[in-house]
Image: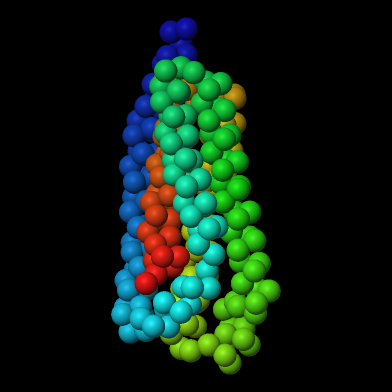
Amino acid sequence: MEHAHHVEHPDMYDAESSKVGMWLFIFTELLLFGALFVIYAVYRYMNPDAFHLAGEELNRVIGTVNTVILLISSMTIAMATTALQKGQRNVAIGLVSITFVIGLVFLVNKYFEWGVKFSHGIWPGSEHMMNEMSHGEILFFGLYFVMTGLHALHIIIGMAIMVFAVRGLVRGKVHADRPSLLDNCGLYWHLVDLIWIFLFPLFYLIH
């Protein structure tokens, strides 16, 4: 028992460094999306009517549903972290799994939403966009696909981290004394949710 304690002790320093690493990573991600938000703001200021017109094309119901389920997923991942702190490993595994499924539902909704756009001939560089849309509308949909596409990629990365976190929980490598993987998973998922909370009104609730 004493030996196991000594083996685990160096990992406490790793936990600190991994948390610092995650915060640095989150900072770079915020810079990336921050730059895209600035570009969006400039183009929207220059093309207010076209952006409003293009925004009408988006499905607000799907956008709203995705916002609600992501907010719920933020709660479930936070509850998983709390459960682990209390030593409730199985509860933590269940809550991370629920968060994973919510992420999957988000991606399925996004898939159908993009599918409708593609069926209407709307995708970056499409003939319909180039020939029948104004410059402002092309800019709107270009930003829409880039920013929601990047966000979807972050959802997938977050889900991959969850898989590693669950595997660690099942194997007993992630527990109350070594929670850093689950903590970082939660931090990353909150970032993903925060970005969507900004994306949703910018694209779906545009006036």
Kindly identify the residue that appears in the image at 57 percent across and 35 percent down: 98
Kindly identify the residue that appears in the image at 49 percent across and 73 percent down: 56
Query: Left or right of 185: which side holds 162?
Result: right
Q: How many labels, in total? A: 0
In this view, 122 is above or below 37: below
Q: Residue furthest right?
A: 119
> Can you say which quadrant of the picture contains the C terminus?
bottom left
In this view, 149 is above or below 56: above
Residue 172, can we see it?
no
Res. 112 image quadrant: bottom right
In this view, 160 is above or below 202: above
Res. 35 image quadrant: bottom left
Q: Position of residue 54 (x, y in %)?
A: 48, 77
In this view, 134 is above or below 163: below
Kindly identify the residue that appears in the image at 55 percent across and 57 percent down: 62
- 91 or 28, which lies in front? 91
Q: Position of residue 202 (x, y in %)?
A: 39, 66
Kindly identify the residue that appears in the image at 47 percent across and 51 percent down: 67
Res. 119 image quadrant: bottom right
Query: Left or right of 55: which side holds 25?
Result: left
Q: Position of residue 106 (x, y in %)?
A: 57, 51
- 120 or 87, which lies in front? 120
Q: Position of residue 45 (x, y in %)?
A: 31, 80
Residue 80, can we see it?
yes
Query: Left or right of 53: which side holds 105?
Result: right
Q: Residue furthest top?
A: 1
Colour basis = rainbow
Query: Left or right of 103: which side holds 32?
Result: left
